[in-house]
Image: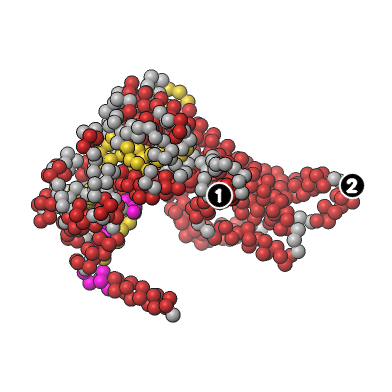
């Protein structure tokens, strides 16, 4: 009986939502998986009577390849900052001028005029963070604020290190570890990078994305990782700490943009403005566990995120961050070759 | 006389024309749906990579050259593409070992089923095909849950005090092989069973009557008679195993690329679609060679028996 009631309730909800979609319009968002707060989407749907559909992608290259072929049917996309110049130069984004929108005043000063989108003509901040190390400090007591944890693996961590297989992130980390600058084409540095990686690999156990679950379960004891992922691991096991490598680490951000071939342009613009409201941005951060670049959103985030060392970069490390940027194609080609050789 | 022959000829050619016309829709579908996409891949393999993925319409042989030759990024010399060759060799070896292992496990299984009473055979076959109802990813993750450090096997061994700390089984070659054999076993058992079902067991009895040892019966009677099944099963396992990358990357930890991963890398982070296309066609050529070997083998098999 109870089940029947639930089924009927579900059917009613489905009916309600579809009729709603016909009545007021739709919005199709193409975003990274596990990255959009369902509560916040619900709020947007109720407030503007719009039916939102979210489709997942797992990498910038996948998103770019799919949208570039045309006819994707998506209205909005959330590329990383190093890809945004490509999206703009390929003519894939619509100039919606978020810099002139009502809620733009809430965007934190340092995110109001970024290099990748001067004057915020296309994009609105979605989330930002860093790439560093996570270490289970029950297993390893030494300094975790170094890429050495990954590239000169300490004895305790040998055979327990994972590396998240983001090619650019991994090679950049090794470049910084060898004293180079991000996207370097300097062959003497790159040779050292290759040697560092090839020498380190026998000490790694895996190269996988699923760190939240496997760090929590003890399959891995250390990994390269994103800070929000590190935060979720600490909630599972307090011994898991996030390290800011002293050799330097990459600061990244993902930003919400409207596609040039979007069918629901008005709803997409409303959503861009909606995301710059501190309450909504805070709600979203409570789900994906990253900072969001909207001033005043902190008070709408869950209490456990306040002052979290993974989210607020401690002052002593702040100067070590280098911005994520697009590497030129010829550097990308060198990176790919090193990457293939590493995994041969 | 000649007129009659001419009429027959005309009739024949009309008949042939009609057949071609009738099969035209099917031919079109094959041409457009099967060859079309392949042609795109072929054309792309001869183009220049775009700066951020995609291709530029400039003809180039770079993609194909890069499959086998590699320009050393540090000293600029050309050499055999060691990385690609290693990955090809690893994929082929893994597929071969998987094929042999599935054969070793599948042969007794199929023999067991074929020798059951006719009524229960269907039930056994059903049990073999049940895993097929489940998604490949889910089956692979199920194995992961069994062999991981905090998984079923290590948990039981620890509980009974047989080991002091978990044995590292996940992310090893053994884990990859276990997964591959489990996933591809039905593809080996079903064709093997199909030929064993037709096996005339009176021949086996005759062999025993003539004082052959069980091993001799297996070698001289059973294996030659079910050879088509063995070959079909091996091909069916070898081909998908060659392109497999979900199982190796989940159970092996993704530290070493398989052919499938290498191709994916070129279309994703590597941004070299022509090279990816050329690698895909190379993989297809390998599969084609394996199939040709099969067809020739099966052909000579038929003529010998005929």
From the image, tell me which residue sits under label 2. B211
Residue B289 placement, left or right of A274: right
Front: mark 2 or 1: 1
Secondary structure at badge 2 equals loop
Q: Position of residue B124 (x, y in %)?
A: 67, 61
Residue B245 lies, in percent from the top left, at: 49, 44
Looking at the image, is A240 positioned above or below residue A202? below
Dividing the picture into quarters, in which one does residue A192 lie?
top left
Image location (x, y in percent) of residue B276 = 41, 39
Q: Residue at (64%, 47%) from the top-left corner?
A: B102
Residue most extreme to the bottom: A1
Circle 2 packing at 10 Å, graded few (<14), some (14-19), many (20+), is few
- Residue name at image x 29 percent, y 55 percent: A287
Q: CA distance from mark 2 to mark 1?
A: 50 Å
Residue A33 is a magenta residue = yes
N-terminal of the two: label 2 or label 1?
Answer: 1
Name the residue at 43% across, 53% down: B32
Q: Could you say which is closer to the camera, residue B124 or residue A219?
A: A219
B22 or B285, which is in the foreground? B285
- The residue range painted magenta reads A19-34
Relative height, residue B241 to residue A299 (above, below): above
Q: Residue A154 in the image: x percent, y percent?
A: 42, 30
* Parent chain of label 1: B
State the residue position of label 1: B155
Q: Residues within 10 Å of mark 1 (few under 14, many from 20)?
A: some
Taking the image as shown, residue B115 lies to the left or right of residue A8, namely: right
Q: Is residue A285 left or right of residue B260?
A: left
């Amino acid at each position: 009986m109870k089940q029947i009631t639930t089924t009927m309730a579900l059917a009613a909800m489905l009916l309600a939502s579809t009729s709603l979609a016909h009545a007021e319009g739709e919005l199709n968002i193409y975003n990274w998986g596990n990255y959009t707060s369902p509560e916040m989407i619900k709020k947007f749907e109720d407030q503007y009577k719009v039916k939102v559909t979210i489709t997942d992608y797992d990498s910038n290259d996948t998103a770019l390849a799919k949208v570039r072929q045309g006819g994707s049917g998506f209205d909005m996309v959330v590329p990383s900052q190093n890809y945004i110049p490509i999206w703009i130069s390929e003519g894939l984004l619509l100039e919606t001028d978020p810099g002139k929108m009502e809620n733009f005043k809430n965007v934190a000063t340092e995110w109001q005029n970024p290099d990748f989108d001067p004057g915020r003509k296309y994009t609105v901040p979605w989330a930002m963070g860093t790439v560093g190390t996570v270490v289970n400090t029950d297993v390893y007591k030494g300094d975790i604020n170094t890429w050495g944890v990954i590239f000169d693996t300490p004895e305790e961590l040998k055979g327990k290190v994972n590396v998240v297989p983001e090619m650019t992130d991994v090679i950049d980390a090794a470049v910084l570890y060898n004293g180079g600058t991000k996207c370097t084409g300097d062959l003497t540095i790159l040779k050292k990078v290759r040697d560092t990686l090839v020498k380190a690999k026998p000490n790694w156990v895996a190269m996988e994305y699923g760190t939240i679950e496997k760090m929590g379960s003890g399959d891995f004891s250390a990994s390269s990782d994103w800070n929000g992922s590190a935060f979720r691991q600490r909630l599972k096991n307090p011994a898991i700490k996030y390290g800011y490598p002293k050799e330097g680490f990459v600061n990244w951000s993902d930003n919400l943009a409207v596609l040039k071939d979007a069918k629901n342009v008005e709803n997409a613009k409303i959503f861009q403005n909606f995301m710059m409201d501190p309450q909504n941005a805070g709600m979203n951060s409570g789900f994906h566990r990253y900072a969001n670049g909207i001033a005043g959103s902190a008070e709408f985030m869950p209490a456990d995120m306040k002052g979290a060392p993974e989210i607020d970069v401690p002052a002593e490390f702040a100067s070590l961050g280098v911005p994520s940027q697009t590497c030129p194609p010829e550097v990308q080609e060198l990176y790919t070759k090193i990457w293939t050789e590493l995994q041969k | 006389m000649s007129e009659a022959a001419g009429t027959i000829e005309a009739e024949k050619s009309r008949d042939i024309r009609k057949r071609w016309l009738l099969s035209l829709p099917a031919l079109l579908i094959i041409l457009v749906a099967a060859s079309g996409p392949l042609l795109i891949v072929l054309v792309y393999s001869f183009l220049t990579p775009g700066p951020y993925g995609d291709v530029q319409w400039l003809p180039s042989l770079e993609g194909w050259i890069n499959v086998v030759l590699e320009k050393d990024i540090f000293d600029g010399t050309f050499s055999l593409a060691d990385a690609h060759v290693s990955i090809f060799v690893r994929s082929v070896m893994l597929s071969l070992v998987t094929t042999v292992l599935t054969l070793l496990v599948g042969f007794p299984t199929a023999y067991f089923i074929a020798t059951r009473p006719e009524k229960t055979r269907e039930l056994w076959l059903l049990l073999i095909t049940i895993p097929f109802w489940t998604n490949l990813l889910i089956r692979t993750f199920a194995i992961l849950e069994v062999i991981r450090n905090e998984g079923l096997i290590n948990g039981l061994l620890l509980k009974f005090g047989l080991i002091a700390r978990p044995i590292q089984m996940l992310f090893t070659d053994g884990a990859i092989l276990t997964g591959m054999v489990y996933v591809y076993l039905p593809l080996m058992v079903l064709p093997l069973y199909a030929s064993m079902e037709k096996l005339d067991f009176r021949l086996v009895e005759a062999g025993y009557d003539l004082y052959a040892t069980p091993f001799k019966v297996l070698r001289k009677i059973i294996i030659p008679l079910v050879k088509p099944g063995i070959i079909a099963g091996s091909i069916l396992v070898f081909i998908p195993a060659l392109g497999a990358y979900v199982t190796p990357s989940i159970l092996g930890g993704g530290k070493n690329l398989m052919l499938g991963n290498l191709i994916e890398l070129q279309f994703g982070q590597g941004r070299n679609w022509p090279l990816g296309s050329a690698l895909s066609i190379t993989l297809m050529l390998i599969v084609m060679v394996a199939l040709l070997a099969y067809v020739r083998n099966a052909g000579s098999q038929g003529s010998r028996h005929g």
